[in-house]
Amino acid sequence: MVTIGYTLMCEQRGPKDLIDDVQLAERAGFEFAVISDHFHPWLEAQGHSPYAWSVLGAAAQATDRIGLMTYVTCPTIRYHPAIVAQKAATVALLSDGRFRLGLGAGENLNEHVVGKRWPPAHLRHEMLGEAVEIIRALWDGGYLTYQGEHFEVESAKLFDLPDTPPELGIAVSGQASCALAGELADLMIATEPKPELVKMFADAGGAGKSAVAQLPVCWGPDEAACRALAREQFGWAAGGWKVQAELPSPVNFAAYAQFVREDDIAELVPCGPDLDAIVEGVRKFAEAGFTEVALLQIGDAQAEFCDLYQSDLAPALRAL
């Protein structure tokens, strides 16, 4: 059985709305919640981008049961890995161990804002590997001094640590990132239902570990309205990871998205009232070997979507 989660998408909701949403998701029966960690939205039409870690602290106090996870944090440019280690440990304590740290190599969209160059993919993977070393070393306790190719840490110690460190996940999209995740991570994170990703992760050391995915949906009573909303809010997604990682601003994503058709997005995102389409989307991930899927409802109808999940969608997904 696949575990079903809920997505707190900072790019489309303000901070107080996100706290309301995670409380609704917990009451509706979602098992975990993932949160995006962006400086910018993908598109200005989305309209938001609060600081995910402040939201996580509030969410930890506003909920009792639901798991929390970053999906994903880049610990290399906008944040130094020592700071990521500290804030992840703090959220783990605030949530009584319900937090998992999802990491990735980042996107230019969010990382260039601190005035550092955007490195090529192979260097981003090297930086991510060093960052994981630093984070895990700080979670072990004691003072850390570290001199790497990309990062330095001088006599740093975390004074508030959970008894058990959070699980750490790494986002993957190909061979290099799967190898990194298999070697260093407790779980794999991906956005496409590709069985080859799960296999490469397993072959690199991730056999038997969790694989977490995300499925965007745009549920609503009017299919035409949902298709239009999905194209407006999610047109950027049609380009895939090669585009998403490289474009530097919402303006650039908008320039790309203007050429994306409704049909292009409808192939990626179940739109309208048909629950079978959502179930089928989750089924593809399950058949590819993923163990957890977080649903991402596009737009503001989050309360209605949580009600739908509790009444109809959760029973349908349990049958998978």
Image: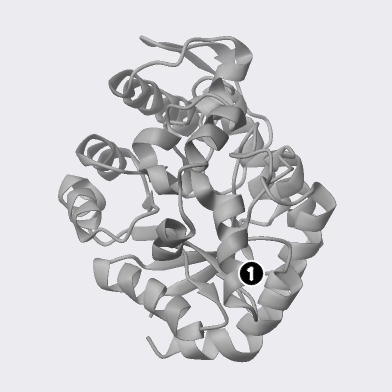
Image location of residue 208, percent across then percent down = 26, 62
Image location of residue 218, percent across then percent down = 58, 68
Give the image quarter of residue 23.
bottom right
Q: Is residue 288 above or below residue 222?
A: above
Residue 169 appearing in the image: yes
The foreground one among 122 and 272 is 272
Q: Is residue 235 above or below residue 156?
A: below
Q: Amino acid at mark 1?
A: Ala
158 left or right of 60? left
Give the image quarter of residue 43.
top right
The foreground one among 218 and 314 is 218
Q: Residue at x 25, y 66 (%)?
A: 288
Q: Is residue 72 above or below residue 32?
A: above
Q: Is residue 293 above or below residue 117?
A: below
Quarter of the image for the C terminus: give it: bottom left
SS for tag 1? helix
Q: Residue at x 58, y 39 (%)?
A: 42
The foreground one among 58 and 121 is 121
Task: Determine which residue is flagged by label 1.
Answer: 225
